[in-house]
Every structure is written in C-alpha cells, then in structure tokens.
Amino acid sequence: MSFQTFTDYLQLEKKYSPHTVTAYLKDLEDFQKFASEEYQYSEIVTVNYSIVRSWIVSLVDSGISNRTVNRKISSLKTYYKFLLKTSQIEINPLAKHKALKTSKKIQVPFSENEIGNVMELFREKEDFEGVRDRLVVELFYSTGIRRAELIHIRVGDVSFSQKSLKVLGKRNKERIIPLLPTVLQSLNHYLSIRAQLENIKDSEALFLTQKGVKIYETLVYRIINSYFSKTSEKVKKSPHILRHSFATHLLNEGADINSVKELLGHSSLASTQVYTQNSIAKLKEVYKNAHPRN
C-alpha cells in the first residue's frame, strides 16, 4: 500500500522535516505489516480499534517503552485524521484512544560552574577541532538552538554587522537569534582556522569535520558528551541538556518566559514551561535551606 498522498500532506502542508516524515512512514509500515500478518489486512485504511489495540499489546510485550508506543500511535492518529479530512474514511478508529501512562522525565540542566569548567578545557586548544568544539558548546549555551539547527547553519546565516544568527527551525520556521560579543569573537576565530582546511567539500556549511565535510548528528552528540563527561556527574550529557540549561538559566535570572519561548523557537508556551520545573525545584531547595522556620 502506498502512503504517497499522506507523505505529500506531511511535507507540504504540515511542513515536517524529512527525518519526521521518515519516522511517521516507518510506524505506518510497521502497523501495516502487523495487520497483514496477524489479521490478513491488505491495507490499514479500514482497520478497527481492536486491531490497533492488539498492536499496542504486542509492542508492550516486546519490551518497547510506553513513551515509544505513544509516539507510534501518534503517527497512526495523524494518518487517520488525514483520511478523515480527505473523506477516505467516515470514522477515526483512534478517536477514543487514550495514551499509555508514562513517567515524567525530569532533565537536569548543567550548572553554570559545570559549563564554566568545560570552557576552561578549551583554553589551551588552538587546533581546528578544539576551536570548532568550543564554538559548538558556546553556540548551544548562548542561543539554545537544537542539534539539527546547529548542523544546518550556513556561513551566510551569520551576520557580524547585525550581531545575529539566522536559524531554520522545526517545520522550516526561520528565526533570528542575537549573538553575544564573545561568541562573535569565537566565530571569527573559527572561520579563520576553517579557511585553512586543505579540502573543503561543503563550503556553505558553517561547521565542518577535519575532512571538510558538514558535521553530523552523532558527531555533535559525541563532542558534547566527551567534554561534559570530564566536568559533570549528570547521567545525561547531550546537546539538548545545553538547550535546557540555556532556558533554565535565563528563567532563573528573571527573563520573560515569552521571550525565552521565541528564542527557543517553540510554537507553544506549554513547551517552554517545561523548563520552569527546574526553577521551581531550585526555589524549593533554597526555601528549605534558608527559611528561618525550617
């Protein structure tokens, strides 16, 4: 069965990234395979909820987490809503479905000390990779951009005159982020060393490997994990935790939540409010330790 019209809908109307579209199609194909093998359905347009429920049970039995199951069912929901919208079905089999319960993941941001200690590690590093990695850390922490956004920054997206960075976010939404003077200095330094690479293949991309090609997601993860493993005891050390730290530290310093929302590129305030949880936890700790009645 072809999902071409649905793919077009995701790409053109919803403006989802290729990565997201691929994930949606994989979920649909997995469900199609299950419905075909277990219930002899040649296509999933006409399935009822009992078949979806059977798939959920089989996923849980195979050890897949509730969070992942919910994501897969979310793909199905979007598909059946599309079929309803285009009059290909009259009833959405997932209309009354309730998501499986999941435990809330509380992500702990890096402290300002931990970030300061990582920056100290770069003090003696003047080779290409050292200068590049420093800029990667600085950009994540000073702008709060996502990993995918950092990878796709082009040289032309940096404006030294406007002291800003143009970022292409989720669903191809552009936003302009101000850059600190120290970050502009690091950018300038990096560009001068980048220009000395022997063979630049991806000249438009800002961040390159030593071989002159555009950096990739796993490399960015390794960079952050490697440096922060030397200064932090936290379980998770990823680019997203730096984004989390950017938001949390701004909010702790009294920044307006709507301004933080715009900087992060969130479409909904609810997404930004997740980062206030750590601020509340911090306030409780301060209160507990400092209140005279305690």
Image (cartoon, rainbow, N blue to C red):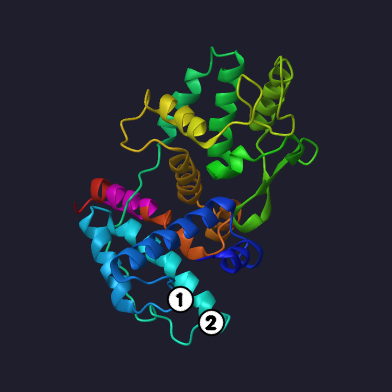
Residue drawn where x is 44% and y is 63% of the image: 28
Q: Amino acid at mark 2?
A: Gln
Q: Which residue is mark 2?
A: 88
Given residues 21 and 168, the one toward you in this image is 21
Instruction: In the displayed orientation, state which residue is furthest to the bottom.
Output: 90
In the foreground, 93 or 74: 93
Vertical order, 51 against 171 (above or below): below
By secondary structure, the bulk of the magenta-drawn segment is best described as: helix
- Taking the image as drawn, is residue 16 in sight? yes
Amino acid marked by disc 1: Val
Report the residue marked by disc 1. 45
Q: Which residues are magenta?
A: 278-287
| N-terminal label among 2 and 1 | 1
Q: Residues within 10 Å of mark 1 (few under 14, many from 20)?
A: some
Looking at the rendered structure, the secondary structure element under dot 2 is loop
Indicate yes or no whether the magenta region holds residue 279: yes
Rendered view: 231 above or below 267: above
Nearer to me, 249 or 26: 26
249 left or right of 165 in image:
left
In screen coordinates, is 121 left or right of 41?
right
Vertical arrangement, residue 14 with respect to residue 143, above or below: below
* Observer able to see residue 100: no
Q: Residue at x 40, y 42 (%)?
A: 109
Examine the image and state in which quarter residue 277 appears. Answer: bottom left
Q: Relative to residue 210, is residue 255 depicted above or below?
A: below
Position of residue 125 in the picture relative to residue 49 (left or right): right
- Residue 100 place in picture, x, y as percent: 28, 66
Q: Could you tell me residue 208's position as x and y percent?
A: 63, 27
